[in-house]
Amino acid sequence: MTAKEIHQLIYTSLETVYDENEANSIAYLWLEKRLQLSRTDVILQKEAIDFNKELFQQDLKRLQKHEPIQYIIGEGDFYGRVFQLNKDTLIPRSETEELVHLILQENKSGQLLDIGTGSGCIPITIGLESDIITFGIDVSASALTKAKENAHSLNSTTKFQLLDILEQDLSSFDPLDIIVSNPPYVTYKEKEVMDKNVVEFEPELALYVEDDNPLIFYRRISMLASQKLTERGKLYFEINEQFGQETADLMKKDGFKNIEIIKDFQGKDRIVKGIL
């Protein structure tokens, strides 16, 4: 088969699983990651390609079961870099890139802690793009293993630590200038309307909170941040669009000022930030 024929086969196989644009993007991504072929190669290359047909069929079956291609190939793109992923790390999303971009615009130095770091994409990126010294913590040892691998492969000096933020405090860290977190914020009742590829494959530990306590992580992190941040230190949250004002209110109670709710590229409340 030619590259174009492979693309068409993947696309056709996924038409009933994803919408047209998503199926098309997945087909191109598979060709890029598995066969190192660009979109231009797919269009222009006329010769038949020698490739691992058994692996191709395995991947196709997994894709047809809604498994995200990022987990199949074991990596995802974030802010111009490739991050290794496993079943215990969330797939990096463009909304989080917006959060990172905002932090980089507003801060040039200092010490930053990312709470619930997952693959480490937030602190590693910020550390590589600035003079900010970065740290990451997570409750998942498996996620931290992948974060450390990412730091090593990307030549990042970000340090990681296993820590349960609901049970432990931040006493092991010196005073911090910036705290950022994209904690679990999807309520279980929202699970019913979410895409199958998220519900069945992305880590529940990193996604969901109880319906009757959706701000549990925000409340805890805001309180700890008010104790650990330096004067004029900054707190940044990625949030559930439903709870922007509630998140801002609890930060205000903890002494934060200049609190802003910022919309993402889709016009949804996505970031809340404040200064201590």
Image: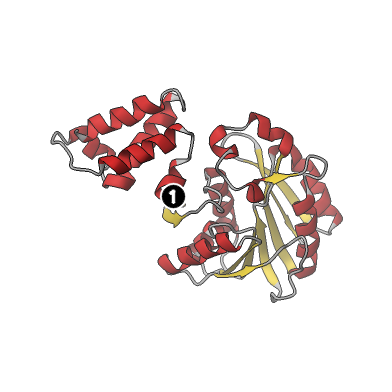
Q: Is residue 219 left or right of residue 97?
A: right
Is residue 31 visible to us here?
Answer: no
Q: Residue 2, located in which quarter of the rendered image?
A: top left
Out of 199 and 215, give the one closest to the viewer: 199
Question: Where's the N terminus, which quadrant?
Answer: top left
Q: Which one is in front, 215 or 167?
A: 167
Q: Secondary structure at mark 1?
A: strand
Query: In terms of depth relative to the viewer, which is nearer, 99 or 119?
Result: 119
Left or right side of 236 for 36: left
State which quadrant residue 253 falls in.
bottom right
Tell me where residue 202 appears, x and y as whole percent: 57, 45
Residue lying furthest left: 47
- Indicate whether 65 appears above or below 258: above
Q: Position of residue 270 (x, y in %)?
A: 65, 42
Q: Quadrant of residue 186?
A: top right
Side of 147 where 60 appears, left or right: left
Residue 240, image x, y percentages: 69, 41
Residue 93, above or below 163: above
Looking at the image, which is closer to me, 24 or 88?
A: 88
Apparent side of residue 34 relative to residue 206 in the rendered image (left or right): left
- Which residue is labeled 1 in the image? 77
Q: Residue at x 40, y 35 (%)?
A: 61
Quarter of the C terminus within the rendering = bottom right
Is 185 above or below relative to 139?
A: above
Furthest toward the right, the residue is 253
* Amino acid marked by disc 1: Asp
Could you tell me if residue 107 is visible in this image? yes
Tell me what residue is drawn at x 62 percent, y 34 percent: 267
